[in-house]
Amino acid sequence: MRTHALLVCVLVMTLAAPAHAVAAVVTLDTAALAKADASLDGATVRFEGEALGEALRADATHRWVNVLGGAVAIGVYTPDRMVEAIDGYGDWSRTGTIVEVTGVYNVACPQHGGDLDVHAEQIRVVAGAREVQHPVDVWKALVAAAALGFSAVLAVRFRAVWRRRYY
C-alpha cells in the first residue's frame, strides 16, 4: 500500500511540475535577418558568416563584432570571452574567421539605441582566418608602362612647344 501511495505521489509531482519550454532556434542567413519582420524579435537565431574589421569595445564586458554573410553584415553584441576564439578579422589582405553565431535577435534593440542586432549566446568557429593573395596581372603592368611612356613623350613635346613660344 505504501509503495502505491509513493508511486502516486511521484507521478502527481512529475505531472504537476512546470514543463520547461525549449525555444526553437531559427537558422537564417544575414540577408534574411536584415529583412526579418517583428515576428522574429526576441527569437533565438543561428547564422554563419565572416568576422570583419575588428572587435569594437561596446562596454566593460562586451564587444561588437560585424559578421558578414553574403552581402549583408549584422552587428553581434558578444561577451569578451567569446571574441577570443576569433583568430582574425576580414580585410583586403585576409579572409576573416568564419563563425556560426547563436543568439537573441533584436529588430530594434532598446539597449542599443533601437538598432538591429544579435546578442550572442554562443559563437562557434567554423573556419580560421587565412591570407588572401592578390597577384599582379601582367596586362595591368604593361598598360601602366605604356601610359607612363606616353606621358613622358607628351611632357617632352609640351616642354619643346612651351620653350618655342616663350623663349
Image (tube, grey):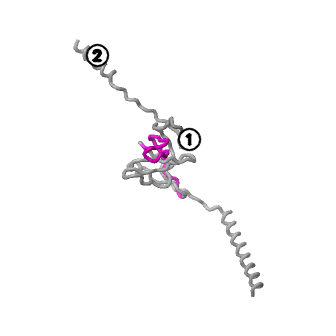
The secondary structure making up most of the magenta span is strand
Pair 1/2: label in front? 1
Is residue 140 visible from the viewing direction of this image? yes
| Relative height, residue 163 to residue 151 (above, below) | below
Q: Which mark is residue 35?
A: 1
Question: How far is the residue under mark 1 from the one under mark 2?
Answer: 52 Å
Which secondary structure, mark 1?
Answer: helix
Q: Quick one: which residue is furthest to the bottom in this view?
A: 167
Q: Residue at x 73, y 75 (%)?
A: 154
Residue topped by disc 2: 8
Left-right relation of 65 to 17: right
Position in image of residue 29 (x %, y %): 54, 41
> What number is the disc on residue 126?
none
Residue name at image x 49 percent, y 52 percent: 129
Residue 126 is left or right of residue 138, and the answer is left
Residues in magenta, as a range: 93-120
Contact (Cβ within 8 Å) of mark 1 with mark 2: no
Looking at the rendered image, the quarter that the C terminus falls into is bottom right
Q: Position of residue 54 (x, y in %)?
A: 47, 55
Q: Locate residue 62, reporting x and y percent.
A: 39, 50
Query: On the rendered structure, is 71 left or right of 157?
Result: left
Q: Is residue 102 magenta?
A: yes
Task: Say if 158 sits above or below 53 in the image.
Answer: below
Near-viewer residue (61 or 139): 61
Residue placed furthest toward the left: 2
